[in-house]
Amino acid sequence: MTLVVVPVRYPLTAHSEATLREGVRVAEERDAELTVLHVDLYQNSGGVSRSDLKRAVEGRIGRVDRARFVVRRGFLVEETILEEIVAEDADVVVIGSKQAGRWRRMVQKLLSDPDIDTYLREQLDCTVITVNGSGETVSHADG
């Protein structure tokens, strides 16, 4: 079964909602399961639960079929997201352009010429879709 992972902020921002809507669309199009992921930072914990996340998502976009809601605790958002993507063996990752920018800066510390889409494709062997705040796909890279 194909798996789409969509990392989001909580409470949901307009950008997270746009990214989530694209993730739901991709999951439906590919007849895939969906994981909605939020990283609750240890150092700034909001005490977010899975049911909080599910309620927020369904309150904004309605019921989502074949969706799993995951809250992971971590020190670094980007690293925790990558760990979840690898652990779940995701086929598609739908991220907001702001998140892509953060990953780009993180990767830039490791590599001299960061291309986040290429890096993620090579490291994760999955499709990476980046969505801007208006909900438009700004890049689409197949792994």
Image: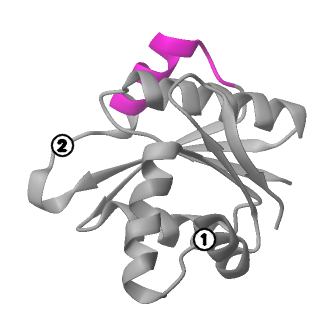
Of the 4 image quadrants, the one containing the C terminus is bottom right
Q: Under tag 1, what secondary structure?
A: loop
Query: Residue 94's spot in the image, x, y percent?
Result: 63, 46
Element on which disc 2 rests: loop
Is residue 10 visible in the rendered structure shown here? yes
In the rendered view, tell whether residue 73 sits above or below residue 23: below
- The disc label shown at residue 115, or none: 1
Q: In the figure, is residue 112 to the left or right of 137?
A: left
Distance from the alpha carbon under mark 2 to that under mark 1: 34 Å
Instruction: Residue type at mark 1: give it.
Output: Asp
Q: Earlier in the sequence, mark 2 or mark 1?
A: 2
Name the amino acid, label 2. Gly
Residue 60 on image: x %, y % = 48, 13
Quarter that holds the N terminus = bottom right
Q: Is 27 within the magenta?
A: no
* Residue at x-position 83% and y-position 53%: 2
Q: Which residues are magenta?
A: 52-64
Q: Are marks 2 and 1 in contact (CB under 8 Å)?
A: no
**Relative height, residue 46 to residue 91 (above, below):** above
Q: Position of residue 49 (x, y in %)?
A: 31, 39
Residue at screen point 64% across, 36% down: 67
Residue 108, given in percent of the width and then of the height, sits at 43, 78
**Label ID, residue 47:** 2
Q: Which mark is residue 58?
A: none
